[in-house]
Amino acid sequence: MIYDILDVFKKQYEEKDDKLILDNYLLKDGLYVKIKRDESLEYFIFKNSKNEKVKEYCLKDLNGNINSTMYQWFKERDYYSVYLNSNKAFGDKKIHNVNYLSLFVKLESFTNTDPKKQLANGAIKKQFEDLKTFKKFKKKEEKEILKVFKDKIDSQDRLNDIEKKYYLIKNNLDTIIETAKNNNVTNYIKIFFDEDIGKYKNESEFYYAIKIFNDIKYSKKIDKEIWGLSNANMGLNSKKQFLESKTKNNPVPFFITDKNALMLKRFFDWLKFQSYEDNYPLEKNIFIKKHSKNGEAIIDDFDFIPNEDERLSKSIYYKNYLIARDGKRIIEDNTIDLLWELEEKVDEIFYNNQLKNNYFNEVWNKLDKSFQNLIYITRAGVVNYFKKHDDRAFYQIIKKYGTDFILEHIRHDRMLRAKLSLNLKFSLSAHKGEVIMDIQAMQEKIIKKLESSNYENLKPDEFFYLSGQVAKYLIGQSKAHEKTVELLEPFLRSNNAQKIKKAIEFTYFKYKYKISLNYVKFNNALTLVMAFKGEDKLSINMDAFLVGALSNNIFYIKKEA
């Protein structure tokens, strides 16, 4: 995955350089201080607002005036000054910058009364002292890397500049803290010196050289290149030994050069500012599902998508098999030509509009538990089709779980949605060449049997279809306020034909006073059902039963003259 991403990102980075990242870079809330070359101070406050799309407008001076020019100035220098993460702090973890040209500390580290939350006395001085020589890094791998920068680090001009800037901060820090408190700043104090951006970049190089890898101890010099373990989306340490490669001399899962590690860092810097709703932020044929953790982007899923058109290779004919009605209107058949149209249909009908909102994260806990589980079980295969154009698992899901969606709707009294789900299941199955029950032919066959008093043994599919018809007719005799689902549930819980017969018998005796003794069609149907001797499983024949229960009921169809 790493190299696949880098190959594509490098091409975009080569065109725009760090501007690719900085265009979307976002400052954190706080007091921003510019120490000018004449040693005077300028103050600005950044407070992000979700309602403000132009983030430059969120930076204002102490009088409330917007200063978009300074926003650009600060964000460039901020990017080259901030640490990779708290585990990669240059020194004290409460100091979040990595060069001597800036100082990032949260206000509470100066004002909190809890000693554990306070910045230690002397921590800032120590940071500046360590930035002078980098001698605090004593591992042999660190020393080897820092040799490359020795002349730059040891420059007397640089050492003098560090000393000067430390005292400027020391002499102004109390005033800066008071300014932050007086202006109700609640997050950061960020101090920047007025220096060229090139100087900020150069100083950041020293830090990245020794901190860009996950752990410097895994780094190796091979053919004049430094190789090590990427720090991006990787947390190999003593607490995560399961990530180690146990069969190699070196336990690192994979190596990456320092140049590629830095490019990968840039990629994740860019990624964290992309919309988390956009699963194709890099290119249309690269699927990247991500989430945010502690302000950093974490990739959950990645795949290359074939360059396929959204148009389906073969249109899907969505047929109203059950002749379902929305009110008095018969729902028309239609053709699905595009993948996104199918996604909309599946989300609306099977998932009751709860699929796309729950594609990747924790499923909404206010949904019924059984429906939550159904989403968890099926969504991976659905994502593979609608986001990655791979339909192999999708049609297996329809075959295995399609009926579960219908039952879920029935149990929540969404009868129209249940009918539409059965129509959709049959339409998708027919699209893949499966033989679908000819409902009209089944209906005509059963009516012919009933009107001719033909008591030949029913086939299993005929029995379950007729049982569904009988059950629905009996339920329709109830005048109680019970929902259809409550009356239908005993039939759905019956696991074989004989138990369905018992459920029908029980319901018949409950409502037989409402059924005429001279109603030949129904009496013949009841006789046929009760004469069935098979032990066939309802689970195998559920679709036939549901067709009977959800389609037009033959006991309300008048005999043609």
Image (spheres, rainbow, N blue to C red):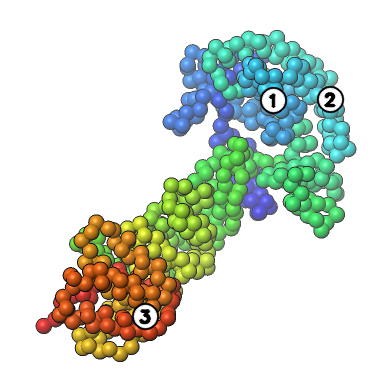
User: Residue 370's spot in the image, x, y percent?
Assistant: 45, 57
Residue hosting label 1: 94
Q: Amino acid at mark 3?
A: Asp
Image depth: mark 3 or mark 2 in front: 3
Label 1 with label 3: CB-CB less than 8 Å: no
Q: Residue at x 62, y 20 (%)?
A: 108
Image depth: mark 1 or mark 3 in front: 3
**84 shown above or below 112:** below
| Crowd band around label 3 with a 10 angstrom C-alpha radius: few (<14), some (14–19), many (20+) | some
Q: Which mark is residue 461?
A: 3
| Crowd band around label 2 with a 10 angstrom C-alpha radius: few (<14), some (14–19), many (20+) | some
Quarter of the image with the C terminus in it: bottom left
Q: Which secondary structure, mark 2?
A: helix
Quarter of the image with the N terminus in it: bottom right
Q: Specify which label sits upstream in the sequence, 1 or 2.
A: 1
**360 shown above or below 206:** below
The residues tagged by marks 1 and 2 sit, at their Cα atoms, a distance apart of 21 Å
Q: Amino acid at mark 2?
A: Thr
| Crowd band around label 1 with a 10 angstrom C-alpha radius: few (<14), some (14–19), many (20+) | some
Q: Residue at x 80, y 47 (%)?
A: 227
Q: Which mark is residue 189?
A: none
Image depth: mark 1 or mark 2 in front: 1
User: Residue 24's spot in the image, x, y percent?
Assistant: 55, 36
Q: Specify which label sits upstream in the sequence, 3 or 2.
A: 2
